Amino acid sequence: MSPLARNLVVLAGLALVLVAACARRRRPRDLPFPRSRALAALLPAVTAIVATAPTLALPYLGDDVILLEQHGPKPTPFHVWRPDEGEDFLRPVAWMAWWLYDRVAPVDATLAHAVSVALFAAVAAVAVPALRRCGAPRGVAVASATLFAAHPAALETVAWVTNLYSVLSCGFSLLALAALPFGRATPRRLAAPLVFALLAFLSKEDSYLLPVLIAAAAARFRLRGIGRGLRVGAPFAVLLAAVVAARFPLLHGFGAGTKPSVGAPPIVGNALSGPWTALRTEAPAAYVLPVRRFGGEADAAWMHAAAWLPALLLLLGGASGAARRGAPIGVAIAGLGLAPTSSQLPVGPTLALARELFTPALGIALVVASLLAGVAWLGRARWLAVAALLFASWAVGRRNFAAWERAGASVNAAVASAAPLVRDALEGLLPVVTASSMKEAVAQGYHAAAPDGVVLLAPACASFDWFRDYAERGRVFKEEVAKLRGVRGG
């Protein structure tokens, strides 16, 4: 069966569930879970840490170095709020983090990765109250947040520090949902959700449909509550309009997505062709358990099994009350999270754009957890089914992560192998000594030089294991020379 036919089968089954949601009568079956908020937050948080812990060993990659160079030199973190000339995005919340990384850890990426892992754990924990506020039962909400924490797309996103945008956007959006008042929505009670929404809007553009989700959550995803939902969602829409209006004087236009560029097609031109291409090749079935394609028969077996998993889950629990309650909410979260960046689809066999699935992965997890909760004949063993899917997600994520490990190893190996190559090339031509730091190198040069001699810094290759870039290398050299002379900055 072709990918398009398979995806149409899955979509048809999901459509039947959504239609049946309008006719639900009985209270949906929930997954049994203790009435403990601490445990409900701890389970997805610990899962997130375990799933993404391997990213701590990765160096800065690709755009990470560019962002450090772009925002690090600015005098204060408040200067990053004004975009640079030619900037396409308005994401100052994450830019402040890059300013800090440049000062605290400009070379070693461990701190930056640790922050990303910690933030992701917090996002997974806050997903539980956010889903509860949307109307998901307690057990289903915990299972959804835990599956989200182990989703392969989440690991792909957290593995690259640049994707801090996506983590912050999703986290602040969930905080806005979780903080929504159940009673009367007074300005005072809406203050905190509005602040969280503003931070989400200033983190990444994929949060721009948050007002719609806010309105749906305030209405508890029920038609009879649509009036209240619109009243609660209106201030968030006004806030979004103000943020969008601010883009025009700051970015000299709307910014990203409105003009052609390498790797980023315009939204208008690709908003429909992107999803259609994805439907014919990978979505939606592949998004439940995205598998990186390395090549070979093993890949084909993995992808074939993963692609039919949604159909199997729909067959098992699609007719249940739990599915009729949770699936519409999950589809709404996934759709509203993916729609602003739909022009970036398809994600591709290398999962190069897996970050676009980060927020939608929570909605996908809610649909899956709701389907599993509806398999009544499993009883309490439904948690075993959740655990099995959790393990499968972790295994696929670790398998996909091999590409990141290879990328990190190649960067480290390239830097580490340069020193002996340079030494071997110069051996016999002139005296060669080695140093373990710039301070030691300057001291050796000082002692080896003649009284009226010159010590010249003439790098033969990159030194990313010591410095972020050539500018920092030169600055540290001058500082060490100044210390020898006893004159700071000379």
Image: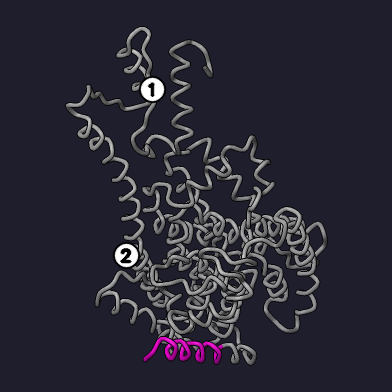
The residue singled out by tag 1 in the image is 456
Furthest-top residue in this view = 451
Residue at figure coordinates x 29%, y 79% from the top left: 301
Give the x, y percent position of residue 329. 60, 77
Q: Looking at the picture, which amino acid does disc 2 mark?
A: Arg
Q: Residue 423, image x and y in percent?
A: 23, 32
Q: Is 26 within the magenta?
A: no
- The reply to whether discs 1 and 2 touch (Cβ–Cβ < 8 Å) is no
Q: Nearer the viewer, mark 1 or mark 2?
A: 1
Residue range (magenta)? 1-17
Please give left or right for residue 464 compared with residue 183 in the image. left
Say if 268 sits above or below 241 in the image. below
Residue in the picture at 72% in, 84% down: 223
- Our reading of the magenta stretch's main secondary structure is helix
Q: Residue 192 lies in what quarter of the image?
A: bottom right
In this picture, residue 426 sits left or right of residue 307? left
Q: Nearer the viewer, residue 225 or 485?
A: 485
Rendered residue at 81%/72% (across/down): 231
Residue designated by label 2:
399
The one of 253 and 137 positioned closer to us in this rendering: 253
- Helix, strand or loop at label 1? It is loop
